[in-house]
Image (tube, grey):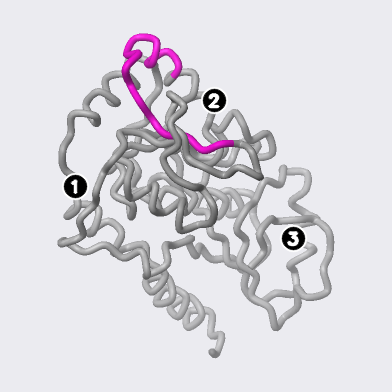
Amino acid sequence: FVMGARTQKLCRYTKNTIPVIIDFWLKENELELFYQNFKNCKLVLITSAEVYQYLLDHNCPLNIAHWPLSLPDYHKLSLDTVFNKKWDLALLGRTNPYFLNFLEKYCEKYPDFEYVLGSNNIDNRFFYTNTGKQVGHANGREAYLEMLRSTKISFYTTPGLDLAKTETDFFNQVTPRFLELIAGGCLVMAHYPKNADTEYYELNTLCTDIDSYEEFEKQLNTYREQKEVPIAKYTEYLNKHYTSERINLLVEILEYNQIKI
């Protein structure tokens, strides 16, 4: 697994290696060095459909295939999954200023709205409400997942539209965070473009692209009033994106490329 595509050469990229490219922020003038770096690999797997299409459009000389990121099977939903939603909204991890600005404006209009956010103090990892009430610790991944399962609404933005991430340039792949939100039974308020990746993950079937404050306020009010998690829809959706499904796809890709396993 190559966490970030680089132009520096590494000796482990050989004919016996199948690299899986996760983050890809390279510019067009860096592509030749990228190609040189992986030229000895029989196959290079690209997790982003957008990047995969971009490389094809730039006549990539490497043998590449699209192998998307997935959600571990231990997150699997079933029709009888029940969530106890304690909070209307939680801000988990880095939140795009795009939504923070909308939320600030919303709270001015609805001053009684209470939501949860994490502290930025590395020595004091707790979840607090915007009124200052401590509602749980934020140590470890399980605490994060439990807060997801306890939250009705969450925000999601693809990386290239995240104003807090300067390294992402113009690529907007869908990250596993989106799948985690769905597995946590969250109603997602999102900001994303139309591209090969958002189409592959069918974002428009689960959430619309919020492109104005007016749409933000309307959607947030609608979600606050919604009582039920669309569990059947979420279960059907995630069944296509578990790691076990990706393993089946990987076997197909290897067989197509006549690579023995």
Q: Give the label on residue 33, or none.
A: none
Q: Which residues are magenta?
A: 104-119
Look at the numbered disc 2 and give the secondary structure of its residue.
helix
Q: For the residues carrying marks 1 and 3, which lies nearer the camera in this image?
A: 1
Q: How much space separates mark 2 and mark 3, taking CA atoms?
A: 35 Å
Q: How much space separates mark 1 and mark 2, taking CA atoms?
A: 28 Å
Q: Identify the residue position indicated by label 2 in the image.
A: 97
Residue sitting at x 56%, y 36%? 119
Against 241, is 182 above or below?
above
Residue 102 colored magenta? Answer: no
Look at the numbered disc 3 and give the secondary structure of its residue.
helix
The reply to whether callout 1 and callout 3 are in contact (CB within 8 Å) is no
The reply to whether callout 1 and callout 2 are in contact (CB within 8 Å) is no
Residue sitting at x 33%, y 52%? 184
- Which mark sits nearer the N-terminus, 2 or 3? 3
Against 225, is 29 above or below?
below
Look at the numbered disc 1 and give the secondary structure of its residue.
loop
Q: Give the label on residue 230, or none.
A: 1
Residue sitting at x 38%, y 53%? 146
Q: Which amino acid type corresponds to the residue marked 3 in the rendered image?
A: Tyr
Whole-percent x, y for residue 162 in the image = 56, 33
Q: Give the label on residue 35, or none.
A: 3
Q: Which amino acid type corresponds to the residue marked 2 in the rendered image?
A: Pro
